[in-house]
Amino acid sequence: MRKITFLVVMLVSMSAFCQDFDNLLTKKQIDCSDIAANSALYFIKYIEKNKIDSAKLLLQYWQSKCGSREPVFRAQLLLALKTQTFNDSLVTDKILDHIFTYRNRLSLTEGDEPYSFENYKSYFGFVPPAQAFDKFTRQLASDLKWLYPTHSMEYLLAEFYGDNPDEIFTKIQNNTYSTSPLTIEYNKAVDRFLKMPEGHMSWITGVWIPTGGIKKLGAHPELGFQLGAKTKKMNYDLTMSFKFINSSNTYLARRNGVLESTNSFFGGYIGFDAGRDIYAHKRNELQVIGGIGFDGFDALKEDKNNDLKSASVGSYNFNFGLAYRYYVNNHFYLGLRAKYNIVDYTLNRVVDFTGNPVTVQFLLGRVNNVYRNSYLNELKYRYRK
């Protein structure tokens, strides 16, 4: 009898256990997709009926269940604009994320990937784009902006969510919004990307101007290039340049201990240059520069008929000066630099005169970091710092 009773109890327990799993595994769970979809529709309803208190409670519930996602933030912002209770506390460190999400949301409706929303529901706050909520908030924002002065932060944000979503980053770079919390957050983001190192390359053209004893060599055109990097305020480059065209005056050069008259001249410089930005504002940049390298020129050509080798002048080169860059955009610049070069061309006794040349150079340069530039382009950043 006890065995039968035990079996009956076991069967009843197992049946109840299975029923619990049936309830657990088949009961529909309320998730953020349902909450967001319904909250978006009820927000429209409450605003249209001017039920402000109900709208506030709805947004509190929506945010508590789904977090501060872009549709929730947008609704909170527009409600504050409608009730004229907007304040800086609404502009948090996440506002740029919300702005980017909204811009991506708009581009989603214009792209060729109709199923993108299905893959990124969480990112877009579980509210389908280009439907009732988006259409309503866009019209609401367009209407609300006229409640505020055209140069106010309220007007700017309402314009962004209304009929002009493309100009917000361009406008906040003006001095009008320089102290606003949105501009502060924007500048923080810009500064993070501006600190990324960039590759640098430039083409050099200019003139080599001798002074002192080498003045008899005359001025010579110069061509060259630079390869290096720019990081924060520092610039590091390997520089190579050539100066050419025969001297306009003859001079004496020594070969095998014998002085010969010549006007030959073909020179070069290779060295390491460094510079530091001492002033940078918008498109303008001023640098103090210096370098160390090897400098020289061919004084006597090879004479095969008389079995004579060429003779070249060589010297160290310590140089310093100033450089200016004007950035046409964030990548390309036009530059001008002037350097004073300390050399001693008498070191290998090919010539008996020396002096310190001045170089004036024009540069066409490019600085580039693909990731950095991509981020700055998204921020519509117009200047360099």
Image (cartoon, rainbow, N blue to C red):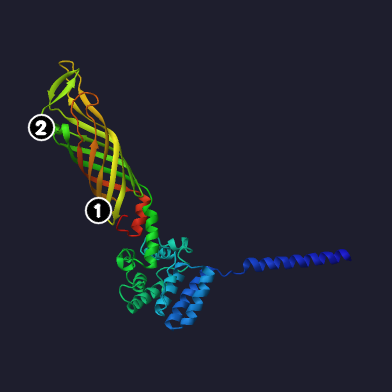
Query: Mark 2 against mark 1, which lies toward the viewer?
Result: 2
Q: Quadrant of residue 100?
A: bottom left
Q: CA distance from mark 2 to mark 1?
A: 38 Å
Name the residue at the top extreme.
306
Q: Position of residue 382 (x, y in %)?
A: 30, 58
Q: Position of residue 212 (x, y in %)?
A: 17, 34
Q: Mark number for residue 328?
A: 1
Examine the rendered structure and indicate whether residue 143 appears above or below residue 202. below
Q: Position of residue 327 (x, y in %)?
A: 26, 52
Mark 1 is on which residue type? Val
In the structure shown, which secondary structural element does the residue marked by tag 1 occupy? Answer: loop
Q: Position of residue 106 (x, y in %)?
A: 37, 66
Callouts 2 and 1 close, C-beta under 8 Å: no
Name the residue at the left extreme.
249
Q: Which residue is mark 2?
A: 248
Q: Residues within 10 Å of mark 2 (few under 14, many from 20)?
A: some
Q: Mark number for residue 84?
A: none
* Residue 115 appears in the rendering: no
Mark 2 is on which residue type? Ser
* Residue 17 appears in the rendering: yes
In the structure shown, which secondary structural element does the residue marked by tag 2 occupy? Answer: loop
Q: Quadrant of residue 7?
A: bottom right
The total of numbered circles placed on residues is 2
Instruction: Say whether disc 2 or disc 1 marks the residue closer to the N-terminus.
Output: 2
The quarter in which the N terminus is drawn is bottom right
Name the residue at the right extreme.
1
The quarter in which the C terminus is drawn is bottom left
Residue name at image x 37 percent, y 57 percent: 190
Examine the rendered structure and indicate whether residue 14 appears above or below residue 141. above
